[in-house]
Image (cartoon, rainbow, N blue to C red):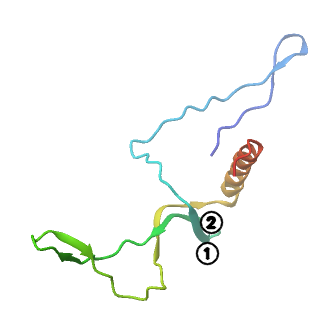
């Protein structure tokens, strides 16, 4: 749970001072920022919101076959079989999370603030 801040504590002559909570951040040795450009997910039977973040890119070919030149070196790649009108993409799931409704609301608010800041700077 997030840290809590208690009610004001009285000091001399009716003045009050709010107590403070300091949050220290530690970075896990496993921390690894990942590029993501999409998310998919839903709601579990227990009510958690699942988010699976992915990176979308053109699919890499399983195999590429080249002609060999007269010296045994690689020549041009031969066309691969398949429909030339079709372009394949892949979505690589890089991370996922399960959130309570309250956690999702806090993250939504935080993202909204970052979006407004970027829009105010003229970023798209």
Which of 15/53 is in front?
53
Instruction: Provide the secondary structure element on which disc 1 rests.
Output: loop
The front one of 19 and 84 is 84
Residue on which disc 2 sits: 48
Residue at image location 34% in from the left, 87% down from the top: 81
Could you tell me which residue is drawn at 71 percent across and 45 percent down? 118
User: How far apart are the two marked residues, 1 and 2, measured between alpha carbons?
Assistant: 8 Å
Is 23 placed above or below 37 here? above
Circle 1 packing at 10 Å, graded few (<14), some (14-19), many (20+), is few
| Image-quadrant location for residue 66 | bottom left
4, 25: nearer the viewer: 25
Question: Looking at the image, which residue is at 62% across and 72% down?
Answer: 42
| Snapshot quadrant of residue 69 | bottom left
Residue drawn at x 19%, y 70% as measured from the top left: 74
Question: From the viewer's perspective, is 66 left or right of 31?
Answer: left
Q: Residue 45: which disc?
A: 1
Q: Is residue 21 left or right of residue 95?
A: right
Rendered location of residue 21, percent (x, y): 66, 29
Residue 108, horizontal then vertical, whole percent: 70, 54
Provide residue 27's location: percent of width, then percent of height. Answer: 46, 38
* 75 is higher (above) or lower (below) than 98: below
Relative side of 6 to 64, left or right: right
Tag 1 and tag 2, C-beta contact below 8 Å: no
- Provide the secondary structure element on which disc 2 rests: loop
């Amino acid at each position: 749970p997030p840290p809590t801040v208690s009610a004001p504590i009285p000091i001399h002559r009716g003045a009050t001072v709010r107590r403070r909570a300091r949050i220290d951040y530690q970075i896990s040795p496993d921390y690894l920022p990942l590029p993501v450009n999409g998310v998919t997910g839903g709601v579990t039977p227990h009510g958690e919101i699942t988010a699976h973040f992915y990176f979308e890119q053109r699919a890499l070919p399983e195999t590429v076959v080249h002609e060999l030149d007269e010296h045994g070196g690689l020549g041009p790649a031969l066309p691969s079989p398949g429909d030339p009108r079709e372009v394949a993409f892949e979505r690589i799931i890089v991370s996922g999370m399960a959130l309570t409704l309250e956690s999702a609301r806090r993250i939504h608010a935080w993202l909204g603030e970052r979006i407004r800041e970027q829009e105010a700077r003229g970023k798209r």
